[in-house]
Image (spheres, grey):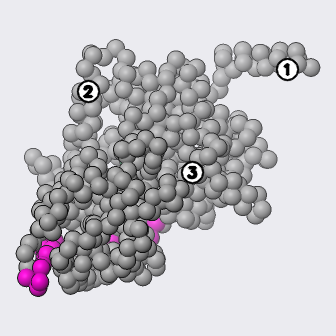
Amino acid sequence: MKKLVLLATGILIFVSCINSPVDQVADSITEKSLMKPITKLSSDDFQGRATGTVGELKTVDYLTNQLKEYGLQGGAEDGSYTQDVPLVGQKTGQNTTVRISQNGQTVQTFDYNDDFMAWPANLQENVSIDEAELVYVGYGTQAPEEDWDDFKEADVEGKILVVKNNDPSSDPDLFGGETRLYYGRYDYKYEKAKELGAAGVLIVHTTPSAGYGWNVVANSWSRERFYLRGNEDMQGSSTKFNGWLTREASAALFETAGLDLEQQLEAAESRSFEPVSLQGLRLSLDLSATYRELNAQNVLGVIEGSNESFKEEFMVFTAHHDHLGITQPVEGDSINNGALDNAAGVSALLNMARGYKELQPQLKRSVLFLIIGAEEVGLLGSKYWAANPTVHPGRVTANINLDGMNVYGKTNDLVLVGYGRNSVSDVVENVAEERGREVEPDAHPDQGYFYRSDHFPLAKKGIPAVFPNPGNEFVDKPEDYASTVDSLQNANYHTVNDEINKYWDLSGMVQDVRLFFDAGYRIINAEEMQTWRKGDEFKQTRLDMVQSAASE
Ligand SMILES: [Zn+2]
């Protein structure tokens, strides 16, 4: 019996090497076929594809037409190609100051934009804080599994919390060591403040703890901000504002309270940290904001599986189509073309959609291409899909999310955010190995990339997900090439210069997309659904979801 199986497998492998339909179709994914949608989507005509603009409508039209042309079906519940993502947009008035007083006298003021950023946390038009107490709460974290509580039962109701960014990292055994967990994200700090009834939150910004400079904080929070509409939870919030304070302003504030900022930041590293009242100081702040309602759109295309017992299960590929739109002109250019972020990822999806459609008779499971809107404004399109999924998450075998591709030439390696956490990672690694390439974990786990892209809301629903990033061992390039690429990336990221430029070389992107295409094919046709590793934070949700799908 054993011999026969081996023989049969041997023949299968032999045949598949010579004549694999996947490889044949993958050959049609070329530099030219990848460049075409990138050129289109990153053209000035699409105006930077911002949420709620004409640029978004054009983008959605183009993507819908492409999916139709390839022969995909609409993936929305009504059979159409789009899912409305209901949003509310918030614009905060910029002409305001934070006033710090002592015994009723103003002793210090901080300016909006230069020193602090703040916005209403409860979707109110006017927020008024009058002489509220300030308390420094370290990392502002309560993590029972780490036996960690920065609040130590302090009553912070109605107070303004001053919080250290990130999570404790000095002890490798705590909070994943250098790795940034959800506790280290600003969203967590704001959620915790709300839970404890604080009146407001200011996170102390430092470049290392945030992973980006103050300019990024100021730019992104002074723009119109978007929230998912109908978030009653938020409307009922007793926390009136959320915000950030620069390191300089924080140091000045602490000094007025007779405290040393650096010492206090250091003190937060300890489990025995206790909240520190900024004695005698009071904070006052008036904020105003205007609102509008709008819809962003997710674009969805489906290829139905050809195996009756598998086709209710889905492989989901994601990439966001939105970008930053039109911003302040830099040397006469005001359009953020978003060629790399993320016309490139969308192009990869379109190419794979065209390819898999050709392979439809060989696909056991169905495939969903979920091209996401409103990512740049807070992963809202993916959060909305996760809350209103068009396919039960317990029937989604896996998610591969693409945001930014390698456009700088061939590499020997490939980075996987989420490396080793689930079986999807293993499949990608196996395919890479067969192709003589190496898969590496994310080199900067401290930046928390796992929580910063569209696969995260899907992972939170238990879907085994990975987020591939470009490698950095370039083939046949000068020795310092990787650092050139690095500085190009940093200089162009989220600026008007994210355009196709003379350094672009899509040979590496061809290599990567063919690899994902092959990995996806194996996942679509695998006997079993993909799983998280034992002990992973998403494992239990996965088990619950699969069970809930089965009992439907
Ligand atoms: Zn992006």
The residue to which callout 2 is attached is 483
Dot 1 lies on which element? Answer: helix
Whichever of labels 3 and 1 marks the residue nearer the N terminus, that label is: 1
Q: Nearer the viewer, residue 14 or 545?
A: 545
Whichever of labels 2 and 1 marks the residue nearer the N terminus, that label is: 1
Q: On residue 516, which mark appears?
A: none
Q: Nearer the viewer, residue 499 or 58?
A: 499
Picture residue at 35% right of the left edge, 60% below the top: 273
Q: CA distance from mark 2 to mark 1?
A: 50 Å
Dot 2 lies on which element? Answer: helix
Residue 383 drawn above or below residue 470: below
Quadrant of residue 275 within the rendered picture: bottom left
The residue to which callout 1 is attached is 5
Residue 146, position as x, y percentages in the image: 49, 54
Dot 3 lies on which element? Answer: loop
- Indicate the quadrant containing the N terminus: top left, top right, bottom left or bottom right: top right
Q: Amino acid at mark 2?
A: Ser
Q: Residue furthest right?
A: 1
Picture residue at 40% right of the left edge, 22% below the top: 411
- Whether residue 363 is visible to the viewer of this picture, yes or no, is yes
Query: On the rendered structure, is 21 left or right of 466?
Result: right
Camera-side mark, 3 or 1:
3
Residue 157 drawn above or below residue 309: below
Q: Amino acid at mark 1?
A: Val
The residue to which callout 3 is attached is 537
- Indicate the quadrant containing the C terminus: top left, top right, bottom left or bottom right: bottom right
Picture residue at 46% right of the left edge, 77% below the top: 233
- Specify whether residue 358 is painted magenta: no
Crowdedness near tag 3: few (<14), some (14–19) or many (≥20) residues, C-alpha within 10 Å? some
Q: Amino acid at mark 3?
A: Glu
Q: Which residues are the magenta region?
A: 85-105
Residue 292 drawn above or below residue 192: below
